[in-house]
Amino acid sequence: MTDFTRLKACLRDLTGAVKELTHHIPHNGDSVAGSRHDITPGILIPPEAPPEAHRARKSTLAAIHQLEVLLGEPTDFLQRLAIQVSYKEGTEVLACIPLHGSVPMKDVSDLADVPEARLWRVVRMTATAGFLQEPEPGSVAHTALSALFFTKPSHLDAAMFLAGTLSPAALQMADTTKHLEWSEHPKTSSFASHYEQQPRLQRQCMAYLRYATGDASATGTDILTCLERLRGSNAHVVEV
């Protein structure tokens, strides 16, 4: 299949998915499940929407992703990586931003003890993904997406686990693995033991498994079971 044929197929899938999606959205643009979730405009399919609405939403996003793969350039990929790195700092200031209206960025930087210039860069970066916004120069406000991370702490836990634990570990994994292979007495630390001793890590990990991987039934026992296969092997579990 040529790239042109794939592009036409993606456009056809997107058109069909969007058509199905519009059937689940009222013509007046209000949220499907009512107004109590309308903290800020933009949430068309709330969590309480029917399963058919969520399937249509996922089909639409899948078609969009395929288009991004076909049309994306290296700069697009690098920008997405940069946004992921910025999410950690972005989520740390959510509590300093009111759910309604905007607030001067200087006030947020003072409350969060973050340099204003640094906060400005983070907001500009995450805003490209719809997370926070700068409605006026020098001000910051929630979007529908970022507001949900504030009102539902489990979403914030998942984001913090991804940005604060998984991303740093992934960036250093190659160097760490190489060091362990050449070390006569490698110092390893068990993720299982840290997991058991840190309730905050447990909470964040559970939230990540549920919302990022779709595994709503995962428990701490499931995670430890996954690590059992590493016993007696040459594999290492490393905390960085």
Image: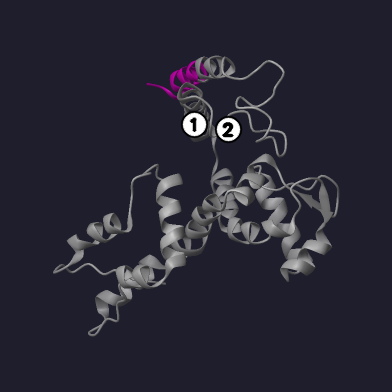
Q: Earlier in the sequence, mark 2 or mark 1?
A: 2
23 vs 157: above or below? above
- Residue appearing at x 66%, y 46% in the figure: 147
Q: What x and y, as percent, mark residue 228? A: 19, 62
Q: Which residue is mark 1?
A: 70
Query: Nearest the camera: 239 or 2?
Result: 239
Pick out the residue farthest to the left: 232
Amino acid at the residue labelled 2: Pro
State the predominant SS element of the stretch in magenta.
Answer: helix
Q: How is the image coloured?
A: one colour
**Residue at horizontal 40%, vertical 42%?**
214
Q: Secondary structure at mark 2?
A: loop
In the picture as drawn, the residue positioned furthest to the bottom comes out as 185
Q: Is residue 37 magenta?
A: no
Please state the horizontal and vertical placement of residue 82, each as a whole percent of the image.
59, 54
Q: Which residue is mark 2?
A: 46
Q: Where on the picture, by quarter, is residue 25?
A: top right
Q: Is residue 212 visible?
A: no
- Residue 34, compared with residue 146, is above or below; it is above
Q: Could you tell me how far apart the alpha carbons at marks 2 and 1 are, in whole angstroms?
A: 29 Å
Q: Is residue 12 left or right of residue 93?
A: left
- Mark 2 is surrounded, within 10 Å at the Cα level, by few (under 14), some (14 to 19) or many (20 or more) other residues, namely some
- Judged left or right of residue 117, residue 186 is left
Q: Nearer the viewer, mark 2 or mark 1?
A: 2
